[in-house]
Amino acid sequence: MAAWFGAVPQPFPCREAVREAFGHPRPELGDYMAECVDERANGLHLLTRVRDALEIATGWTREARWADLDAVRSPALLVEAEESVAPPGQMAAMAERLGAEHRLLPGTGHLVHADEKEFLEVVEPFLTR
């Protein structure tokens, strides 16, 4: 992961270059990342430092947070992308532990809410109960 992030060319000359760098195979990630840049005199730079992004991402793999689920006392809906960054089965196991609903949205990636229509079709009924 560090090698991949380190290979990302900065500064970017334009937002389209950001979309190109991050948008394969999921174009919505490229669109998102094109909004996560700061315009400077020499071009566009990511809002976060690469080492900070790596620390956040690797932190998820070092910390066991299962016990935190036991503190949840409200109804919960876990919406999972088909191409999730979570290990297979983890979201379903979390939902089972919580006694929560779990919905897997086919054809979605990490930014599961990017397809607003499909996401809202799942979330709105849950929120209006």
Image (cartoon, rainbow, N blue to C red):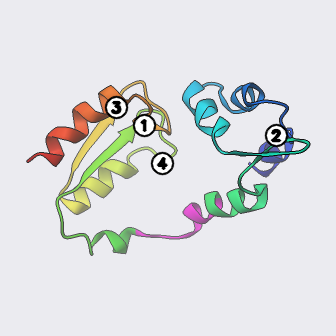
Q: Amino acid at mark 2?
A: Val
| Residue 26 can be seen, yes or no | no
Q: Position of residue 42 (x, y in %)?
A: 91, 42
Q: Most extreme residue toward the right, as rendered? A: 42
Please determine whether, in this image, residue 37 is positioned above or below residue 94. above
Q: Earlier in the sequence, mark 1 or mark 4?
A: 4
Q: Position of residue 114 (x, y in %)?
A: 44, 32
Q: Earlier in the sequence, mark 3 or mark 4?
A: 4
Return the residue at label 4.
86
Q: 123 or 91, which is in the foreground?
A: 123
Q: Position of residue 100 (x, y in %)?
A: 20, 54
Q: Amino acid at mark 3?
A: Leu
Residue at horizontal 22 percent and vertical 56 percent from the top: 76
Residue at horizontal 20 percent and vertical 39 percent from the top: 124
Return the residue at label 1.
112
Q: 52 or 47, which is in the foreground?
A: 47
Q: Is residue 43 left or right of residue 15?
A: right
Mark 2–mark 4 Cα distance, whole angstroms, equals 23 Å
> SS at mark 2?
loop
Q: Is residue 25 left or right of residue 73?
A: right
